[in-house]
Image: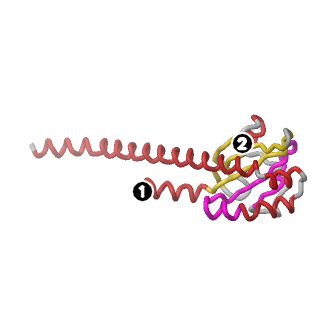
Amino acid sequence: SAVASTVLVRALYPRSSAAAAEEALHGAAAAYEELERQDVARMAAIVDVLAANPEIRAAFAARDRDRLQAVSQPIHQVLKGEHGIGHWNFVDTDTRRMFLRVHLPAKHSDVIERPTLLKAIERRELSAGKELGKSAFALRVGKPVSQDGKLLGYLELGEEIDHFLGRMKQQTG
């Protein structure tokens, strides 16, 4: 009886361990997807508010990089400190060139090829995704910005994945 029990336990243990590991992995994946969904919704709401800001739109429409930086920088500090949003970009409409990286103002004029922003440009609507940019791997949200019915360009926010994964670890253990 003892030998049979030992054989049975040895046969069943690997299966139950694998099943438990698979269940834990599925749980972590579901938690990750929910955190990402929540962050996309939060960043989409923030990007809507920023795109509606008349000072931001006026500076972007005038293509006044210095004024746009001056208006955006104090807001960016709050977004970074309170929401973990470290990336804030303005992209030209036709050329897809970076007009301004609020977080890196000296780095601009490169052509943006990231799929999330290209999707926002193609569809002229909000788009979100995880991507590697010039400075980090981040969850990004991009949106067209218009004024008086004219498309000014695109506004993009991003939060780095490392802090996102830290939050997931806190929630899932």
Q: Amino acid at mark 1?
A: Gly
- Which residue is found at the position 61% from the left and 49% from the top? 42
Most extreme residue toward the top, as rendered?
A: 123
Is 122 or 46 nearer to us in this picture? 46
Mark 2 or mark 1: whose residue is earlier in sequence: 2
Is 147 or 2 nearer to us in this picture? 147
Where is residue 63 shown, x and y percent of the image?
A: 89, 53
Query: Crowdedness of circle 2 by 10 Å Cα count: few (<14), some, many (20+)?
Result: some
- Which residue is found at the position 35% from the left and 44% from the top? 18
Q: Amino acid at mark 2?
A: Pro
- Assign the C terminus to one quadrant of the image: bottom left
Q: Which residue is mark 1?
A: 173
- Which residue is found at the position 73% from the left and 38% from the top? 125
**Numbered badge on residue 134:** none
What whole-number distance in Å separates the C-alpha atoms at marks 2 and 1?
Answer: 32 Å
Left or right side of 166 for 116:
right
Where is residue 80 shown, x and y percent of the image?
A: 65, 62
Q: Quadrant of residue 117 in the image?
A: top right
Q: Is residue 78 above or below residue 32?
A: below
The magenta segment: 76-102
Mark 1 falls on what kind of element?
Answer: loop
Left or right side of 140 for 110:
right
Where is residue 141 shown, x and y percent of the image?
A: 68, 47
The reply to whether the magenta stretch includes residue 79 is yes
Left or right side of 47 for 20:
left
Q: Which residue is mark 2?
A: 115
Mark 2 falls on what kind of element?
Answer: helix
- Assign the N terminus to one quadrant of the image: top left
Query: Crowdedness of circle 1 by 10 Å Cα count: few (<14), some, many (20+)?
Result: few
Q: Dots 2 and 1: beta carbons under 8 Å?
A: no
Is 57 or 170 nearer to us in this picture? 57
